[in-house]
Image (cartoon, rainbow, N blue to C red):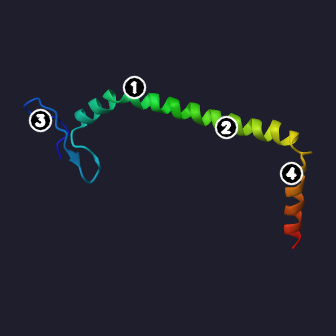
């Protein structure tokens, strides 16, 4: 398997079917460098969304649930759950 670009200077975009990679290491390096900014931007967005969800769940379980403890609807479901477990 060749690991360099073709001798005429063109870039080989052939894919090795067994390794699912570019056949040329140089082509793969250029491809990864070209897509680095887009990949990093996607990772930043993903991290931001995960952080928002994590903080949201934290606030929900530490602030909102204790406030709802005396809510009649919550008490009804707790009682129903206890009765179901007793059966």
Please report whichever mark, 3 or 4, sits nearer to the chain's N-terminal start. 3
Label 2: element kind: helix
Label 4: element kind: helix
Front label number (3 vs 1): 1
Front label number (2 vs 4): 4
Residue at figure coordinates x 33%, y 28% from the top left: 33
Q: Position of residue 82 (x, y in %)?
A: 88, 63
Front label number (2 vs 3): 2
What's the CA distance linking mark 1 and mark 2?
26 Å
Q: Is residue 2 left or right of residue 19?
A: left
> Which residue does the numbered mark 1 point to in the structure image?
37
Residue at figure coordinates x 89%, y 70% from the top left: 86
Q: Nearer the viewer, residue 13 or 72?
A: 72
The C terminus - image quarter: bottom right
Label 3: element kind: loop
> Which residue does the numbered mark 4 point to in the structure image?
73
Label 4 crowd (10 A; few <14 / some 14-19 / many >=20)? few
What's the CA distance linking mark 2 and mark 4?
26 Å
Please report whichever mark, 2 or 3, sits nearer to the chain's N-terminal start. 3
What's the CA distance linking mark 2 and mark 3?
49 Å
Residue at figure coordinates x 70%, y 36% from the top left: 56
Label 2 crowd (10 A; few <14 / some 14-19 / many >=20)? few
What's the CA distance linking mark 3 and mark 1?
27 Å
Please report whichever mark, 4 or 1, sits nearer to the chain's N-terminal start. 1
Label 3 crowd (10 A; few <14 / some 14-19 / many >=20)? few
> Which residue does the numbered mark 3 point to in the structure image?
6
Please report whichever mark, 3 or 1, sits nearer to the chain's N-terminal start. 3
The tally of labels here is 4
Disc 2 and disc 4 in contact, CB within 8 angstroms: no
> Which residue does the numbered mark 2 point to in the structure image?
54
């Amino acid at each position: 398997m060749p690991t360099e670009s073709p001798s005429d200077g063109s870039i080989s975009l052939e894919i090795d079917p067994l390794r699912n990679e570019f056949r040329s290491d140089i082509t793969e390096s250029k491809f990864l460098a070209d897509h680095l900014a887009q990949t990093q931007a996607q990772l930043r967005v993903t991290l931001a969304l995960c952080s928002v969800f994590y903080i949201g769940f934290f606030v929900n379980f530490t602030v909102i649930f204790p406030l709802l403890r005396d809510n009649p609807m919550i008490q009804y479901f707790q009682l129903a759950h206890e009765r179901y477990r007793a059966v």
